[in-house]
Amino acid sequence: MIGKENSYTLRFPFVIDQKIRMNMPSGYKMIQSPPVKKLGEGTKAVLKESIIHWPKKAQLIADSTWTVKSVIVDDLLAAILREELAACMRWPVLDLPFRK
Protein backbone atom coordinates (compact mmCIF):
# COMPACT_ATOMS: atom_id res chain seq x y z
CA MET A 1 0.00 0.00 0.00
CA ILE A 2 2.65 2.52 0.98
CA GLY A 3 5.53 2.50 -1.45
CA LYS A 4 8.67 4.53 -1.92
CA GLU A 5 7.09 7.17 -4.18
CA ASN A 6 7.62 10.83 -3.26
CA SER A 7 3.95 11.77 -3.28
CA TYR A 8 0.71 10.13 -4.31
CA THR A 9 -3.02 10.39 -3.70
CA LEU A 10 -5.59 8.14 -2.11
CA ARG A 11 -9.04 7.77 -3.64
CA PHE A 12 -10.77 8.99 -0.49
CA PRO A 13 -10.12 9.67 3.21
CA PHE A 14 -10.94 6.69 5.44
CA VAL A 15 -11.51 5.40 8.95
CA ILE A 16 -10.69 1.84 10.02
CA ASP A 17 -12.25 0.93 13.36
CA GLN A 18 -11.52 -2.42 15.02
CA LYS A 19 -13.29 -3.48 18.20
CA ILE A 20 -12.89 -6.73 20.05
CA ARG A 21 -14.96 -7.83 23.02
CA MET A 22 -13.98 -11.08 24.71
CA ASN A 23 -15.68 -12.82 27.59
CA MET A 24 -13.05 -14.30 29.86
CA PRO A 25 -13.49 -17.16 32.34
CA SER A 26 -14.26 -15.68 35.75
CA GLY A 27 -11.37 -15.41 38.18
CA TYR A 28 -8.71 -14.48 35.59
CA LYS A 29 -6.83 -11.20 35.90
CA MET A 30 -4.66 -9.44 33.37
CA ILE A 31 -1.10 -9.40 34.70
CA GLN A 32 0.13 -6.58 32.51
CA SER A 33 -1.62 -4.44 29.95
CA PRO A 34 0.25 -4.29 26.64
CA PRO A 35 1.44 -0.88 25.46
CA VAL A 36 -1.19 0.94 23.44
CA LYS A 37 -0.29 3.41 20.74
CA LYS A 38 -1.40 6.93 19.96
CA LEU A 39 0.34 7.90 16.75
CA GLY A 40 0.03 10.92 14.50
CA GLU A 41 -1.51 13.33 17.01
CA GLY A 42 -1.88 16.71 15.29
CA THR A 43 -1.47 15.27 11.77
CA LYS A 44 -3.92 14.18 9.07
CA ALA A 45 -3.46 10.50 10.00
CA VAL A 46 -4.19 9.46 13.58
CA LEU A 47 -4.10 6.00 15.19
CA LYS A 48 -5.59 5.51 18.67
CA GLU A 49 -5.68 2.22 20.58
CA SER A 50 -7.16 1.23 23.92
CA ILE A 51 -7.44 -1.97 25.94
CA ILE A 52 -9.81 -2.22 28.90
CA HIS A 53 -10.10 -5.24 31.20
CA TRP A 54 -13.05 -5.55 33.58
CA PRO A 55 -12.27 -8.38 36.03
CA LYS A 56 -15.69 -8.20 37.73
CA LYS A 57 -17.52 -8.53 34.41
CA ALA A 58 -14.86 -10.96 33.10
CA GLN A 59 -14.59 -8.95 29.88
CA LEU A 60 -11.79 -7.56 27.77
CA ILE A 61 -12.46 -4.77 25.28
CA ALA A 62 -9.81 -3.67 22.76
CA ASP A 63 -10.32 -0.81 20.34
CA SER A 64 -8.22 0.57 17.49
CA THR A 65 -9.24 3.52 15.30
CA TRP A 66 -7.15 4.68 12.33
CA THR A 67 -8.35 7.93 10.76
CA VAL A 68 -6.80 9.34 7.58
CA LYS A 69 -8.24 12.76 6.71
CA SER A 70 -6.19 13.63 3.61
CA VAL A 71 -6.09 12.20 0.10
CA ILE A 72 -2.78 13.87 -0.78
CA VAL A 73 0.15 11.95 0.71
CA ASP A 74 3.53 13.66 0.90
CA ASP A 75 6.80 12.27 2.32
CA LEU A 76 5.97 13.15 5.93
CA LEU A 77 2.46 11.71 5.82
CA ALA A 78 3.74 8.57 4.04
CA ALA A 79 6.21 7.96 6.90
CA ILE A 80 3.40 8.36 9.45
CA LEU A 81 1.14 6.00 7.47
CA ARG A 82 3.88 3.35 7.32
CA GLU A 83 4.35 3.50 11.11
CA GLU A 84 0.61 3.38 11.76
CA LEU A 85 0.08 0.48 9.34
CA ALA A 86 2.79 -1.51 11.14
CA ALA A 87 1.03 -0.77 14.46
CA CYS A 88 -2.31 -2.00 13.05
CA MET A 89 -0.71 -5.22 11.81
CA ARG A 90 0.56 -6.12 15.30
CA TRP A 91 -2.96 -6.69 16.70
CA PRO A 92 -3.32 -10.35 15.61
CA VAL A 93 -0.08 -11.32 17.37
CA LEU A 94 -0.47 -9.19 20.51
CA ASP A 95 0.08 -11.20 23.71
CA LEU A 96 -2.14 -10.56 26.72
CA PRO A 97 -0.84 -12.26 29.88
CA PHE A 98 -3.57 -13.53 32.24
CA ARG A 99 -3.36 -15.43 35.52
CA LYS A 100 -5.97 -17.08 37.68
Image (tube, helix red, strand yellow):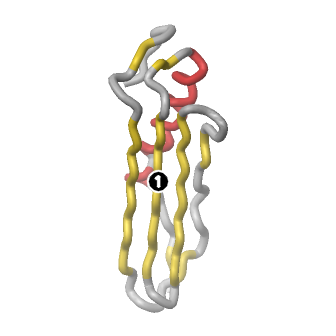
The answer to which quarter of the image holds residue 22 is bottom left
Q: How many marks?
A: 1
Q: Nearer the viewer, residue 53 or 33?
A: 53
Q: Is residue 86 left or right of residue 18?
A: right
Q: Is residue 100 left or right of residue 9?
A: right
Look at the picture and state if 80 lies above or below 39. above
Disc 1 crowd, CA 10 A, few/some/many (<14, 14-19, 20+): many
Q: Nearer the viewer, residue 86 or 13?
A: 13
Residue type indicated by callout 1: Ser
Residue positioned 50% across, 42% down in the render: 87
Q: Is residue 97 above or below residue 95?
A: below
Residue 45 coordinates in the image, percent (x, y): 53, 35
Is 5 above or below relative to 97?
above
SS class of the residue under badge 1? strand
Depth check: give the residue in front, 25 or 99: 25
Please state the horizontal and vertical placement of residue 67, each as a whole percent of the image. 47, 41
- Say which residue label 1 marks: 64
Pinpoint residue 14: horizontal percent, then vertical percent: 39, 37
Residue sitting at 48 percent across and 27 percent down?
Answer: 70
Q: x%, y% of residue 7?
A: 48, 11
What residue is shown at x 50% (from left), y 87% (from top)? 100
Q: Residue at x 51, y 85 (%)?
A: 55
